[in-house]
Image (cartoon, rainbow, N blue to C red):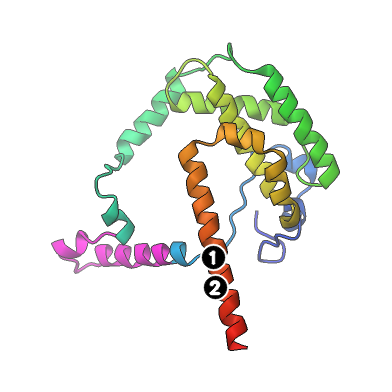
Amino acid sequence: ANPTEGRYDPQRTFAQNVNLTDPILSRFDILCVLRDESDPVQDERLADHVVCSHVRSHPDADARDKSVKPKLAQKVDHVEPIDQELLKYYIVYARQHVFPKLNDIDKEKIASFYSDLRAEAFRSGGQAMTARHVDSLVRLAEANARLELRQHVLPRDTDTAIGVMLESFIQSQKHQVAEELRKRFSRYVIKAAPQTDMILAVIERMFRDKLERLGASRAAGGA
């Protein structure tokens, strides 16, 4: 769904931005907010990728042109990309042959998380939490196990499902309460996120804060 004002307003809730009712939104397992934000690093990567793509696809491109890669791809050349046909067969196999069982699922953790998040939804006015979201948690945990071709749901699958749903809920909030919610529900995020992902997220946030301070100081100096 596109924002009603043409651009997503972080000072409004997700429902206010897309003008959809709670009964409709509750039918989605997760909500993902894609914002067009200014990020010098990501913008440079995107521009580099687009230019290289045009160079490779030009009708008169020679062997050298067709081997052009973005700077990021050059740095991670040791990583072998997954062939698309192989990935397609992998997904088909997982769907047809892997049906994870819920023997070891932590019912108390899911019930506690749902209760806390539902209470917060009523308090803050964000995404409405209904009984459907309990089913969503189970489906997400099963999907994570199926992704690894496992026939049993493990505790880490439940943690991942909780982390995904929590991030979905936080993104549906107004900007001023989002960070507060991250701190309040940090016990769930810490369990769900791998340590490397957490470190990268912290570094990225520090980098963005530094850029913002640098931009503010330059603006003040120019004034």
Residue farthest left in this picture: 63
- Residues 129 and 132: in front is 129
| Labels 1 & 2 near each other (Cβ < 8 A) | yes
Magenta-drawn stretch contains 138: no
Q: CA distance from mark 1 to mark 2?
A: 6 Å
Q: Position of residue 101 (x, y in %)?
A: 55, 14
Q: Which residues are magenta?
A: 44-70
Q: Quadrant of residue 97?
A: top left
Disc marking residue 210: 1
On the question of residue 220 being in view, the answer is yes
**Left or right of residue 62, residue 223 in this image:** right
On the question of residue 131 being in view, the answer is no
**Left or right of residue 64, residue 113 in this image:** right
> Which secondary structure, mark 1?
helix
- Inspect the image, locate mark 1, and give the three-letter code of the amino acid beneath it: Lys
The residue under the point 42% across, 22% down is: 149
Q: Residues within 10 Å of mark 2 (few under 14, many from 20)?
A: few
